């Protein structure tokens, strides 16, 4: 039994560290009303896809940190915010008044297409994509940093470190960190 559990655990670890290719999708930006797809950013060094909401307290804790990352990596990494939440308070009209100051697309995923594509379960949860030959693979996924409530107490900045390594062409390790936040309910 112990050997079987060890094999299952090792297989899961190998699978989770494998780079997953993400198929392109198109969602509507609630600010501009325009369709946005990954292909729009194939010339970027990478794309940071952040599943977020405006009702989850954890997302509100991270808003200023995301703004700092967006500003720091402007012109190098494209950020996309995606809201897959189904709650009434998370409708498109409410989305349009939130996150406008970040200056990045805020995409409505009410059919949960992107959520299913990425396997997102939390808000906030980030997926850093690398782009090569028109294809996108997940280079890092999970938490933004190790302290969701207090930015000043964060000791490990997982997303920032992953972006720096992606830009430098280095291997990102660890490639995943458990995301902490609100559960995104499936339809």
Image: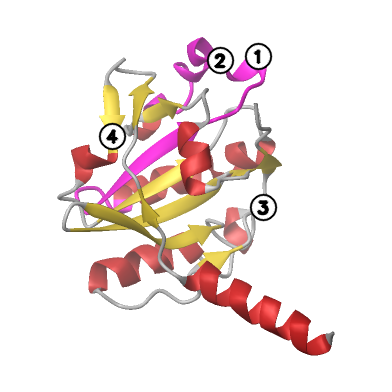
What distance separates the C-alpha of mark 3 from that of mark 4? Answer: 26 Å
Q: Residue furthest top?
A: 93
Label ID, residue 88: 1
Residue projecting furthest to the bottom: 3
Residue 143 inside the magenta-drawn segment: no
Rendered view: 181 above or below 92? below
Extent of the magenta region: 72-100
Tag 2 and tag 4, C-beta contact below 8 Å: no
* Separation of marks 4 and 1 at Cα, in angstroms: 25 Å
The residue at the point 34 percent across, 35 percent down is 25
Q: Distance between the Cα atoms at labels 3 and 2?
A: 23 Å
Nearer the viewer's eye, disc 3 or disc 4? 4
Classify 60 as above or below 77: above
The answer for how far apart the CA atoms under marks 1 and 3 are is 23 Å
In-image side of 182 versus 137 (left or right): right
Q: Which mark is residue 140?
A: none
Task: Give me the C-alpha separation between circle 2 and circle 4.
Answer: 20 Å
Q: Say which mark, if any, is on residue 91.
A: 2
| Quarter-of-image position of residue 31 | top left
Instruction: Check disc 4 and report its element: helix, strand or loop.
Output: strand
For the residue labelled by badge 1, is the local secondary structure a helix, a strand or a loop?
A: helix
Q: How far apart are marks 2 and 1 (CA)?
A: 6 Å
Circle 3 sits in a helix, a strand or a loop, which is it? loop
Circle 4 packing at 10 Å, graded few (<14), some (14-19), many (20+), is: some
Disc nearer the start of the sequence (4/1)? 4
Provide the residue designation for mark 4. 37
Of callouts 2 and 4, the N-terminal one: 4
| Direction from residue 81 to residue 151 in the image, left or right | right
Location of the C terminus (image quadrant): top right
- In magenta stretch: residue 95: yes
Mark carried by residue 180:
3
């Amino acid at each position: 039994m112990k050997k079987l559990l060890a094999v299952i655990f090792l297989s899961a670890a190998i699978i989770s560290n494998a780079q997953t290719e993400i198929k392109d999708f198109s969602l509507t930006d609630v600010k501009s009303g325009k369709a946005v797809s990954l292909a729009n950013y194939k010339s970027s060094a990478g794309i940071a896809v952040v599943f977020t909401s405006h009702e989850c307290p954890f997302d509100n804790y991270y808003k200023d940190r995301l703004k700092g990352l967006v500003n720091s990596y402007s012109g190098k990494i494209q950020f996309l915010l995606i809201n897959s939440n189904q709650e009434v308070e998370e409708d498109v009209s409410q989305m349009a008044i939130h996150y406008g100051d970040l200056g990045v697309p805020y995409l409505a995923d009410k059919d949960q297409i992107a959520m299913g594509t990425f396997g997102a379960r939390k808000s906030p949860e980030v997926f850093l994509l690398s782009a090569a030959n028109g294809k996108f693979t997940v280079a890092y996924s999970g938490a933004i940093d190790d302290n969701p409530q207090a930015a000043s107490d964060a000791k490990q900045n997982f997303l920032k470190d992953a972006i720096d390594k992606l830009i430098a062409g280095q291997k990102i390790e660890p490639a995943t960190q458990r995301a902490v936040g609100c559960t995104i309910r499936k339809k």
